[in-house]
Image (cartoon, rainbow, N blue to C red):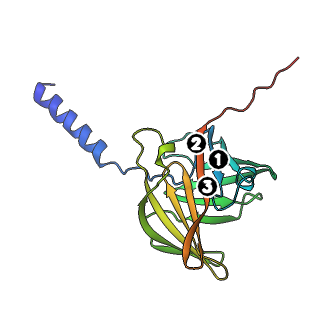
Amino acid sequence: MGRTGLLLGSAALLLALACQPRQAAVYAPWEEGLTLAYENPALPQPARSSGRMQVRVARSPVAPGGPSAVQLDLTSTQGRATLNLLCRAGGVSLVAQDGQSQTRLLPEGFPAGESWTERGITFRVVGRGAWQGARLLPPGTDPVGIWVEATPAQGPRHRTLYLPDLGEVETMEERRGEWTTVNLLVARGFTDLPTLTRP
C-alpha cells in the first residue's frame, strides 16, 4: 500500500472514531473506593459533625459503556446501610433490596429531559450552575453541574446540584421563600477496606 493509501486509511480511522457516539456522563459516584462525606450546614455544631454521612463506592463493575450496577455503603453515627444504583444512558435509579423495583432519581438521557415525575414528586431541570465547593475537586475538573428541582405534593421544594462522577454535591431546601443548604459535600477522597488478618 502506498503513502496515499496509508494516509487515507488513517484519515478514515480518525473520522470513524470521531463519529462514534460519546458516552453519557454518569451523575452519580461510581469509582470503586471513592468516599464522599456530607454535612448539613444549617445545623449548629456539634450536631453538624455528629450528623455527618459518609458514602463509599463499595462495588462498581468496569465495563464498556460505563458503569451499570453500583453499590454504595452509607455510614453515620446512626448506623450503616447499603444502596444499589443502576446507572444507564445518563440516568440513575435506586434499586430496591428485592432487586426488581426501582426508583428513578434521574431519567435516561439526563440532562436533556426537562421534567419527570416519580412517586408523586415532580422533578425539573433548572439549569447549569458552578459549584461553590470546587476546591474539593481534583485540579482541572469542571465544577459546572446541573440543578434539579423537586416539588413534592406536600412539603418544601428542594434543589440539588449534580456533578458528573459525583452525583449530589449540594441540596437546598426552600424555607420561608429562601433557599437554605441542607446537605453539602464537605470531603472527597479514596479509601480501601481494611484487610483481614488471618492467624
Q: Which numbered dot is residue 37?
A: 1
Q: Disc 3 marks which amino acid?
A: Leu
Query: Would you place residue 12 above or below residue 174 in this image?
Result: above
Q: Real-space Cα distance between discs 2 and 1?
A: 7 Å
Q: Hey, which residue is sitting farthest front in the picture?
A: 45
Residue positioned 51% across, 43% down in the render? 136
Q: Real-space Cα distance between discs 2 and 3?
A: 22 Å
Residue nearest the viewer, comparing 71 with 190: 190
Query: Would you place residue 140 above or below residue 145 in this image?
Result: above
Circle 3 residue = 86
Q: Are the two marked residues, 2 and 3, in contact with CB atoms closer than 8 angstroms?
A: no
Circle 2 residue = 188
Q: Real-space Cα distance between discs 3 and 1?
A: 21 Å
Q: Are the two marked residues, 2 and 1, in contact with CB atoms closer than 8 angstroms?
A: yes
Circle 3 residues within 10 Å: few <14, some 14–19, many ≥20: some
Q: Disc 2 marks which amino acid?
A: Arg
Expressed as whole percent of the image width and height from the top left, the position of residue 89 reads 49, 57
Q: Is residue 144 left or right of residue 57?
A: left
Sequence order check: which comes first, mark 2 or mark 1? 1
Residue nearest the viewer, comparing 74 with 47: 47
Circle 1 residues within 10 Å: few <14, some 14–19, many ≥20: some
The answer to whether residue 109 shows anywhere in this view is no
Q: Quadrant of the N terminus?
A: top left
Sequence order check: which comes first, mark 2 or mark 3? 3
Residue positioned 45% across, 70% down in the render? 126
Residue nearest the viewer, comparing 26 with 135: 135
